[in-house]
Amino acid sequence: MVLIERLNYLGGNVSRFNNYFPKLCPPACGLEINYSRIRSNPRISYHTGASVESICGSDGDFRVKISVEPRLINNNCTSCGLCAEVCPEERPQKLGRKAGEKAAYINNGLAFPMKYCIDPLVCKREACGKCLEVCDYDAIQLNASPAEVELQVGKIIVATGWILYDAARIENYRYQEEPDVVTNLEFERMLAACTREKTKLTRPSDGKTPRRIAFVQCAGSRDVNHLPYCSAVCCSTSLKHALTLESEYPDIHAEIFYIDMRLSGRNEKLLKQAEGKERIALTKGKVGRIVQGEGEANLVLEVEDISKGFRREDAFDMVVLAMGLTPNHVAAGLKVNKYGFYLPEQRAGIIPAASCKRPMDVSSAVKDATACALKAMQR
Amino acid sequence: MMSAEKKHMALAICTGCDIGNCIDADKLTDAVREAFDGISCISHKSLCSEAGLEELRKFTREKGVDRLGVAACSPRVKTAEFSMDGIYVDRINLREQLAWVMEPGEEDTQMCAEDQTRMVLAKLDTIKENTPYLPEQVYSDVLVVGGGIAGVSAALEGAAAGYRVHLVEKSDRLGGYAGRIYKTPYNEIDLSARTSEVMSHPGVEVHLETSIESISGEPGNFFVAIRNSDSATLKVGSVVTATGWKPYDPDKLSALGYASPRVKTLEEFEQSVQVEQPPDRVLFVLCAGSRDENHLSYCSSYCCGAALKQALYIREKNPGAEVYIVYRDIRTAGFQEEFYKLVQADDAIFMTKGVIKSVSDLGNEVEVVVGESLLDEQITLVADLVVLATGMVPNTTSDLKLQYRLGEGLPELEYEFSDSHFICFPYETRRTGVYAAGTVRAPMDMEMSQEDGAGAMMKAIQCIECVKRGEAVHPRAGDMSYPELYMERCTDCKRCTEECPFGSYDETDKGTPLPNPARCRRCGICVGSCPERIISFSDFSINSVSAMIKAVHVPDEFKEKPRVLVFVCENDAYPALDAAGVHRLRYSPFVRIIPVRCLGSVNKVWISDALSHGYDGILQIGCKPGDDYQCHFIHGSELTEQRGENLQETLETMMLEPERIQTRFVEITDHHEIQEIINDYVEELELIGPNPFKDM
């Protein structure tokens, strides 16, 4: 098995999550087991920073050209961290990214591979060269160029995953204008950073601790103007967020605005747990728009409160948009359904797996990937 | 593999990555030479570099080294670099768990490095050659139990991968529930094509009207006694159980009027609609029994889609019909949303959120009172027929008749589903080689059941291939060691058979354990359980850990240098300790760390060894127990808690403070907590004072 990953670390979106539903446990725990399986299994190799350039041949005999972007730090890296210590360049501030993260960085303390890399967009290369001076292991290669690798394989599993629907396209929610309106993925990473760095949750605009956080469900999903389908995971995700806030941030109140609360199977218990909590409110109603208000809680939500039958305006100091999921289209030339997700049936030998086929949660993705591995063993 | 006769141990020290600045490598070498006669030592400023590895390889070749301690970074990094053919390598984590967390140049740090190194070398000195467990015969056929959609899918996918499948179905036809429905819902799955394909597939042997009398043995060697018109024994390597579901018992739903002939379940309506015209007014009650603490507290997942489907074909068959749907939330996840839209667009289908207050049969029609609706406080609806969308209850897996002392089926977890409990590892059930698929594992629809059958089959095949190679299947995939019992000293106390979470041990009538190594997950809980200390792995045994404990030099009480033994679970706590290192979170240099396969593998004798050796305290750090446990071996952490209570009593009889032994549970991301736990504990211990058994 050869694993091709576009980013510099394995684990995808999940490796940057704070916790999973319904157990509210950290994903790093399962990832660690999988990483250790990869570490010790000679039948698996992997390339990071790699993208597919071309695929020729047919079922049973594919030739795949991949281009491997240099990490600018090679495999000699021991993850000692000296390069990051002396690096004068900082990566741009991003929600959930460690403040002041250097151009030479590592994903987190449990990253795989446990090696540093350099952000090529920020690094000044030889003009700076500070890392070159301190690295004792000849690991820094600031002029490395992309490598071409050719693979011969019998089958190809496509597991390119998902990305969020672009929040800026829902203009009513003022995602671009308001720094305190964030997506659920950004919020997840903010919570993960709080766990990792043991810091308090603060809102992006002024660094203050938010008091009231609103969760806007179906942001993009179930909406003919955006995504006509249901994204399947966002209700569980928001309940998970609310429950995490409830247990770890005693000053924060959460309110979830929803059309239908969609939890499947045992995830139902998230709803049961949330219903009993004083600092979690659940309101049936779609948020029409978000307008600017006065004072600290300056995000005013206009909601049709369906169960009470009136229109409500309420101010929050932070808003999390439960954004819909879309397929992460990096594999061109595959057959898609009307929503753009890959169809299960492709030309022989090419097998799409997990959330590039439809929105699904982690457990379903693992399940489907296991099934697809079996399909790849079939002649 | 190591040779049995000669044994040459060596130590390689890396002084790179702050290690050389933190400790004196020459002093470390001297300390090691003093403790281990004839040991060969080498040190390098960058052992993992090509030059370092070249030198190391030359060194091991020349000295004839067959066991090597590498004092460098964590075993979680540079794993491939330090793996060497024919040499048993163990790592001494002087980087993440020493140089990055302790004061450089301090005496206490140096002492810690020397102790930790001696510990690993002492362990290397005890380990035995590993002969993997390779049964003479490993069967590659797979048994699939249940001929519903998940079972049929498992059989077809397994056969297509070249594995012979026995598909056992107790009724006289394949298809299960899905095979009896009038129309498939949103996703078109041609089940009849799949069932006829499986019937004629040369790789699948279908056994209809067949029941299982017993399944005995272990992965690779399961013996399945089946009975139909006559009896036979199948020999298979692994099992997929896809025994499906049944509707929740509607007799328990008298409050929803089930006693009336005008009230039917989804399933009953699905059958009747195939023979009779639907009436003019039909009312659906969703969540009939589901999401209800008094009945099924989970969501049955399939019923919203199924009810919407029925509403649509009522309208097809009887264009004059009106349909009401009373729901709590409409749960049409993913692309099913489109199907919901279709139903909403039909003017004669009325949907309302609400709670059913009463259902009364008025003789010729049914009156349904709905409260908390969005229209009004209370509304009254009248229908000719009420359809209750009853939930999904998993069938039992005890039909497998597993000859395990822990029961005949897979353990039923939350809500009685035979799930794995692990989000990341949905198939890793508690019985190695037996994998649940479809609705017996979790509520799911037809499409998901089909995928689930394929996934479980993959796991079943993987299991067979692992057994052939003598490897553990999961979670310690690839581990070639397994527990061996020195039976001469066994007292038939049954501790191991009772505490193994995976039913690895059968027992004789007398209670003598009969190990089945291929069922084993290699957690070592049996090592921890055995009062006679007769269970050991080649590289993890009572002796190996005792040797580690005794390798530590304990200063006398006047030196004011307490020693704390820390048992750390390899799965989550050990990586968390490493992450504390990556974050440079300082903790006490008085700790001496021993990684263990699971906290449950800690044997009581190690605790008394440590106390009599003069350690002042013992800290055990493992994964979270409880309902949402994260212990990779189910109840290892829980057992530690239980055993902890007994230990405290032992301590009291020794006139020692029970606080000297403490257990903490962490998540893998708790590197900050690790620092606090260690430092707080050492502080507490300083208040308690030194162990009076020091120097005795």
Image (cartoon, coloured by chain):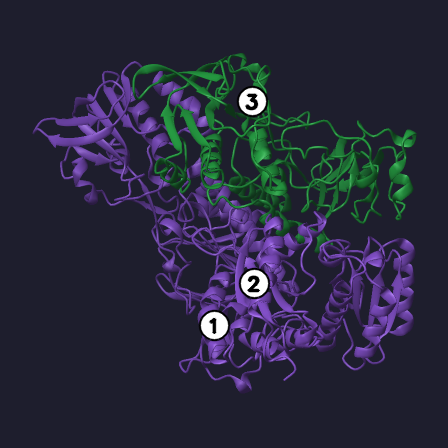
Chain colours: A green, B purple
Front one among A123 and A251: A251
Q: If the image is split into quadrants, where does the N terminus of chain B sit? A: bottom right
Reading the chain from its start, which is encountered first: label 2 or label 1? 1
The one nearer the camera, B177 or B481, is B481
Residue that badge 1 annotates: B648
Residue type, mark 2 in image:
Glu
Quarter occupied by the C terminus of chain B: bottom right
Task: Report the disc number at residue B684.
Answer: 2
Residue A329 visible in this rendered orientation of the protein: yes
Q: Residues within 10 Å of mark 1 (few under 14, many from 20)?
A: some
Is A346 rendered above or below residue A169? Answer: below
Q: Chain of mark 1?
A: B
Indicate the chain on which mark 2 is placed.
B
Q: Residue furthest bottom?
A: B488
Residue type at mark 1 is Gln
Q: Vertically, is A108 above or below B680? A: above
From the viewer's perspective, is residue B146 above or below residue B217?
above
The relative height of residue A3 versus residue B135 in the rendered view (above or below) is above
Element under disc 3: loop
In the drawing, what numbered circle is on residue B108?
none
Three-letter amino acid code of the residue under disc 3: Asp
Which residue lies at the image location 70% right of the left edge and 40% below the top edge?
A107
Q: Mark 2 or mark 1, which is nearer to you? A: 2
The answer for how far apart the CA atoms under marks 2 and 1 are is 17 Å
Q: Which residue is mark 3?
A: A180
Residue B195 placement: quadrant: top left
Q: Residue B228, how many percent across, how many down?
A: 36, 61
Q: CA distance from mark 1 to mark 3?
A: 52 Å
Q: Position of residue A267 (x, y in %)?
A: 42, 40
Callout 2 touching callout 1 (CB < 8 Å): no
Quick one: SS at disc 2?
helix
Tell me the CA gap for discs 3 and 2.
43 Å
